[in-house]
Image (tube, rainbow, N blue to C red):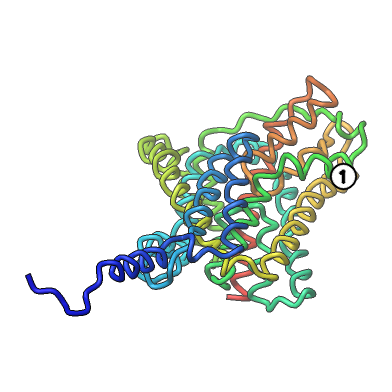
Amino acid sequence: MVLAASYSFGEFMRQTIDAFWSFTGFANCEWGNLVMLCVGCFFVWLAIKKNFEPLLLVPIGFGMLIGNIPFQPGMDIGIYEPGSVLNILYNGVEYGWYPPLVFLGVGAMTDFSALLANPKLMVIGACAQFGIFGAYMLALLCGFDPLSAGCVAIIGGADGPTAIFTTSKLNPTLLGAVAVSAYSYMALIPLIQPPLMRLFTTEKERRIKMKSARIVSKNEKIIFPIVGLILTCFIVPSAIPLLGMLFFGNLLRESGVTTRLAKTASNAMTDIVTILLGMTVGASTQASVFLTLDTLLIFGLGFAAFIIASSAGVLSVKLFNLFLSKDHKINPLIGNAGVSAVPMAARISNNVGLEYDPDNYLLMHAMGPNVAGVIGSAVAAGVLLSFLG
């Protein structure tokens, strides 16, 4: 055995332990990591204990934990380190691959009958998109450049995949903040919307009973995704990746001859994409990137966008009712469903309505503007991309 003349077992062990310690999370931890770890735990708590959108908040919350475990740079494990596993998975967010796949699943699981039975409800979904353009103006006034303002504005659509897709095209550096903001407000709909609904309506309006919707034929359901695709995408071709997949998924559902494909799109595929999307969005909130003044402004403006969108939906119904006969009045409580959070916003409309009349079921009526909001938010995103992209 040949030993170095200066060999010292004690020195060797000290250097080994020092090297090991320098790679641990304890040695690389900063206060921002601890803050984001607490936020991640809070998201998981909201999902499990409060049942706030668990399919979204559990992956996002746990992704925050994954993304904020401190490590030494250069280990090729971080989500922003090219070639790492997390970075490869994050490509689906950064380059906008996941959102169209989510829209395919949404289309395959969505019944547009409520909208087809009462097409004027589409106006409510359109009016709710005022939140997007109102927030765009606010973001410009707050000093955001036009591209970043567009990213912030899309939060008002209450549609996480649309927000991610739009941000990935306009300013990918804001992806974490915009995505977490959009999904957070979607999950908090049960807390945010009911006070607004009560604020802008009278008790008499909340008790309005709407007539049962007509039966929609199978042919109408089959024709709708084809005509819908042509009409919307001729207006905003930039929304083809989202609207094309949405209407394609709906045709798979309604055609009656592609049941297996529709089930795969709406179940297994959507679940897989949701897991990857939520986890990588959460992991992208690394403290060094996420904890900035811009992030706080984005959350604040996103909240304003959501308030404007929900309020615009309710107020648009009140305006609409001025021109409708007594027998055809619309309950303003379904106006909040004009945002694109399907089906939670529609359930909120129904729940608030039942508080004032236990026999007044609004769910099916609210699904009309709710699914219109899905289309409306994608069209609004296309409009933003057309003049900003």
At 70% across and 70% down in the image, what residue appears?
293
Across and down, in percent, residue 360 comes to 78, 24
Across and down, in percent, residue 321 comes to 87, 42
At 74% across and 50% down in the image, what residue appears?
123
At 50% across and 39% down in the image, what residue appears?
109
| Badge 1 element | helix
> Is 348 rendered above or below residue 85?
above
Evaluate whether residue 196 shows in this view. Answer: yes
Quadrant including the C terminus: bottom right
The total of numbered circles placed on residues is 1
Q: State left or right for residue 333 relative to residue 98.
A: right
Considering every residue shown, the one lying at the far top of the view is 359
Evaluate whether residue 235 shows in this view. Answer: no
Q: State left or right for residue 15 relative to residue 245.
A: left
Residue, disc 1: 318
> Is 239 rendered above or below residue 106?
below
Mark 1: amino acid: Lys
Q: State left or right for residue 181 relative to residue 272.
A: right
- Crowding around mark 1 (Cα neighbors within 10 Å: few <14, some 14 to 19, many 20+) is many
At 55% across and 55% down in the image, what residue appears?
161
Across and down, in percent, residue 312 comes to 80, 52
Quadrant including the N terminus: bottom left
Across and down, in percent, residue 340 comes to 65, 49
Q: Quadrant of residue 34?
A: bottom right
Q: Nearer the viewer, residue 225 or 345?
A: 345
> Is 37 rendered above or below residue 265?
below
> Is 152 rendered above or below residue 270?
below
Q: Quadrant of residue 78?
A: bottom left
Q: State left or right for residue 13 relative to residue 47.
A: left
